[in-house]
């Protein structure tokens, strides 16, 4: 078994004619039978999935009937799967989700976060406000957890704790989808204070193959997965926001792919037409590299139309800019990464 | 010769009981005779020094007599060596430097940048202003370049171009200090649009050993180095700002060390009492790792008093926090890094 420590260099960051920095990582592509279609680096080492599995963490919300009981819209379901930018539209939708559960922002236990974009931060500043839990990129997920707690008839306070009934439901779903046992020794605390359980990338890719196709899932779960998948595609802006990778890719691919970023360089995806799930991590936690890695995998996997190709080209090789906006270098996948992907896929 | 690609893992980022991410890199410690006291990873590969060598780039400003002709204060000299946070005090000092040269912010060619802290950005927003070149973290360096151009009697426009007399002076100083030839093939464009020339970490460490001690330098350059060193120590707030690594370390060590960060994970330092220069880079460009690496090297190298030890402890092992401010993990140097440092230093 290869080791986390020996993961290959996958992405270069150039300046002038030199490589200035480089990023290592690992990639797993798995089909609906759990077969590893492509494995680069160590795909068996446990990694924290962070926000990349929010769509899976939302399954109990739908399966339990809570989403129906609360009359959640597609936009609100998408927000439950989001790492949003804290724009007004996101914060407002989270507020409405909480209202539907008879709750308010005071019930959020995720902590505050400034909006991602300066123009959204500026709106708060000019209104003499400070950010609250609604602006936290995870507020929709938390509103979903709170709605589930209400529908289950359990206390809402402490819904972020590992032994709260909501988190136990979420953990059970993740154990079923990954096939892994998720015990305290692989549990960390996420940035929004809920538990995050480490599993191999291979397991997360398997889970997303099932999520995207419904294959191997019980009918109730397959329906819930379909509903969440469609909600994120139809309301891709709610999943991230302006100029964000996840929103841009899901909008451009109109249902062909589901993609979701996570902190510390994790990225997951589902490609239903191929029956594949994808999970990857940049070793050092860099989002710029995880995005280039995901764009590269999608570019190699899929037959692209002109618009899809143009979008992915820009995401595979984003420029490194000076503060005057001129190009000083770029991010680019390494040749070895491309050839490893292509050789694995030819064999499959 | 070892390769950039094989640099060892030096810093872990943990969550719960697991390593979530890791950072590789290389470290060079060199004495005034140019001897490599400690070399971890590839110290011969060329890396872009970025802002870590601003203090060396300021030497022509002082040596030429321009700093005296312009009547620059210690605070202004420190700002010329700064990657500041764009606080009001920094922007105002840059404005005064420009005024002393008969110039204004319109002459800056570095591009605009939002202040680093939200509270400083908020001041601009509330005043209905947008950031300008004065807020760029490099504005002091640029004001120094412009002052040098005026004193040299050359056109100020285009002072950022590689063939402008100011940049030729800066390149010559870097060639003399590193002993390397700096040609177009190792030239990149920095984020503030000036040329940045790649040299081995070993060369930068050698340059900082000379900068910190004056040894091996002509008297005029040794005097200029001493003046710049003292200015940065005396006005450490101008070199970075509130809660910044460089400011905190230089204030706490009261002249014992000079430290300066650069983009993409570069960090340089001078330790005059040992006659050492230090240069390091985190392969993937992460500042969090470069800071932990520099703090670790200083902790191993120096005999520390209580205050110095307390500060470095926090910088060697900073916590990873949730958005509620509770600890979820921490950054920590790897055992192999510590033992490599200690074994190299025992041999020296």
Image (cartoon, coloured by chain):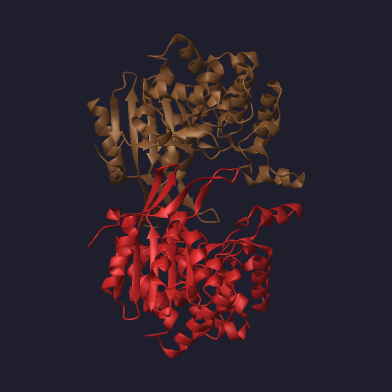
Chain colours: A red, B brown
Identify the image quadrant of residue B69: top right
Residue B302 location, x and y as percent? 37, 27
Q: Residue A168 versus residue A140: which sits nearer the camera?
A: A140
- Asked whether residue B302 is in view, the answer is no
Q: Give the residue drawn at x 54%, y 82%.
A: A152
Q: Residue A270 versus residue B230: which sits nearer the camera?
A: A270
- Asked whether residue B26 is in view, the answer is yes
Q: How many marks?
A: 0
Asked if residue A252 lies left or right of residue B37, the reply is right
Residue B194 location, x and y as percent? 54, 34
Residue B264 location, x and y as percent? 45, 42
Q: Give the residue drawn at x 29%, y 61%.
A: A42
Asked if residue A25 lies left or right of residue B79, the reply is left
B88 shown above or below A212: above
Asked if residue A104 lies left or right of residue A33, the reply is right
Q: Residue B119 versus residue B229: which sits nearer the camera?
A: B229
Residue A268 location, x and y as percent? 43, 68
A111 shown above or below A222: above
Q: Quadrant of the N terminus of chain B?
A: top left
Q: Residue B227 versus residue B330: which sits nearer the camera?
A: B227
Q: Residue furthest bottom?
A: A219
Q: Residue furthest top?
A: B219
A31 shown above or below B173: below
Q: Quadrant of the C terminus of chain B?
A: top left
A314 shown above or below B260: below
């Amino acid at each position: 078994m290869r080791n986390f420590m020996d993961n290959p260099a996958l992405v270069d960051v150039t300046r002038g004619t030199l490589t200035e920095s480089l990023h290592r990582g690992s990639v797993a592509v798995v089909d609906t039978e759990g077969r590893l279609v492509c494995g680069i680096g160590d795909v068996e080492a446990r990694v924290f999935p962070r926000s990349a599995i929010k769509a899976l963490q939302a399954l109990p919300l739908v399966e339990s009937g809570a989403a129906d009981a609360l009359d959640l819209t597609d936009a609100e379901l998408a927000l439950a799967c989001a790492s949003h930018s804290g724009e007004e539209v996101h914060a407002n939708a989270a507020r409405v989700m909480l209202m539907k559960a008879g709750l308010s922002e005071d019930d959020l236990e995720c902590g505050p976060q400034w909006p991602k974009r300066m123009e959204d931060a500026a709106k708060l500043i000019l209104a003499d406000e400070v950010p609250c839990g609604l602006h936290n990129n995870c507020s929709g997920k938390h509103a979903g957890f709170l709605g589930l707690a209400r529908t289950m008839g359990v206390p809402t306070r402490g819904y972020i704790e590992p032994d709260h009934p909501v988190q136990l439901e979420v953990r059970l779903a993740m154990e079923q989808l990954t096939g892994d046992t998720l015990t305290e020794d692989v549990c960390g605390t996420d940035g929004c204070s809920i538990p995050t359980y480490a599993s191999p990338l291979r397991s997360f890719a398997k889970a997303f193959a099932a999520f995207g196709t419904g294959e191997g899932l019980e009918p109730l779960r397959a329906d819930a997965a379909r509903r969440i998948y469609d909600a994120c595609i139809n309301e891709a802006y709610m999943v991230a926001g302006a100029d964000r990778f996840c929103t841009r890719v899901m909008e451009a691919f109109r249902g062909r792919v589901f993609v979701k970023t996570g902190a510390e360089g994790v990225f997951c995806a589902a490609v239903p037409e191929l029956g594949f799930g994808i999970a990857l991590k940049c070793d050092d936690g860099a989002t710029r590299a995880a995005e280039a890695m995901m764009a590269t995998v999608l570019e190699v996997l899929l037959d692209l139309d002109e618009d899809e190709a143009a979008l992915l080209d820009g995401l595979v090789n984003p420029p490194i800019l000076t503060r005057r906006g001129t190009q000083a270098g770029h991010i680019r996948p390494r040749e070895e990464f491309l050839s490893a992907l292509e050789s694995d896929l030819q064999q499959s």
